[in-house]
Amino acid sequence: MKKAAVYTRTGDKGTTGLYTGERVPKQSLRVEAYGTVDEISSALGLARAQVTREDVRETIFNVQKLLMSVMADIASLNLPEPYIKEEHVKLFEDIIDKFDSLLQPLGHFIIPGDTVGAAALDIARTTTRRAERCLLRLAENEPVNPNVLVCLNRLSDLCFILARVECEVK
C-alpha cells in the first residue's frame, strides 16, 4: 500500500476543503471554528498527559474522541443529519454532575495553576470559550448545529470541574 502524502497542494492558494467537499477560504469563520476545536483537543491531550487521576484521564480521552464528531459537524454543510445530538449534551451534563458530586461548594474565585494538569485543563477551558464565541459569530450568518454550541458550553464547564477535581480530590 502506498503511503499517502502529508501535503496535497490543494490549499496552497488559501482555500481548504470542508468535510462535505466544499472549498472555502482558510480564514472563514467555519474553518476558524473547527480549527479552534482542534486546539481544544490538543490542549486536552496535554492535560491528559499531565493529570494524576485515572478517571479524569479517561474522561478527557473520551471527550477528545467526541470532539472529532464536533469538528466534523462544524466542517460540514447541509448534513442530512447532524453528528452532535441532544444525547451528547446529556452525556456532558451527566459527566459534569458525576465529578461535581466529588467537590465541596465553591466559595471563592480560582486562580489557575495549582497543578500542571489543572492548568492544562484551564487552557482547554478558555480555548473552549473562544471556540464557542467563534461559533456564535458564524451562527449569525450560517447554519450551525445548536447542539454543538451547547456541547461547547458544557465542555468549558467540564474542564472547570475536572481542574477542580484534579486539585482538590485525593
Image (cartoon, helix red, strand yellow):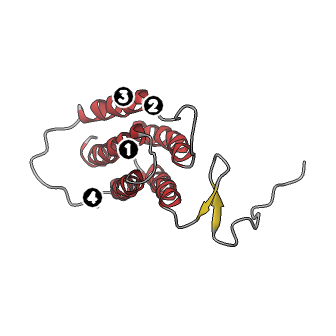
Asked if labels 2 and 1 touch by Cβ distance under 8 angstroms, the answer is: no
Question: Circle 3 sits on which residue?
Answer: 90
Which amino acid lies under the numbered mark 2 shown in the image of this protein? Lys
Separation of marks 3 and 2 at Cα, in angstroms:
9 Å
Question: Circle 4 sits on which residue?
Answer: 114
* Residue 71 picture location, percent across and down: 53, 47
Residue at the image position 36 percent from the left and 53 percent from the top: 136
Residue 101 visible in the snapshot: yes
Check disc 3: other Cα within 10 Å, few if <14, some if 14-19, many if 20+. Answer: few
Separation of marks 1 and 3 at Cα, in angstroms:
13 Å
* Disc 2 versus disc 4: nearer the observer: 2
> Which part of the image, by quadrant, shows the C terminus?
top left
Question: Circle 1 sits on which residue?
Answer: 149
Q: Secondary structure at mark 2?
A: loop
Asked if labels 2 and 3 touch by Cβ distance under 8 angstroms, the answer is: no
In the rendered structure, the answer to whether residue 168 lies left or right of residue 36 reads left
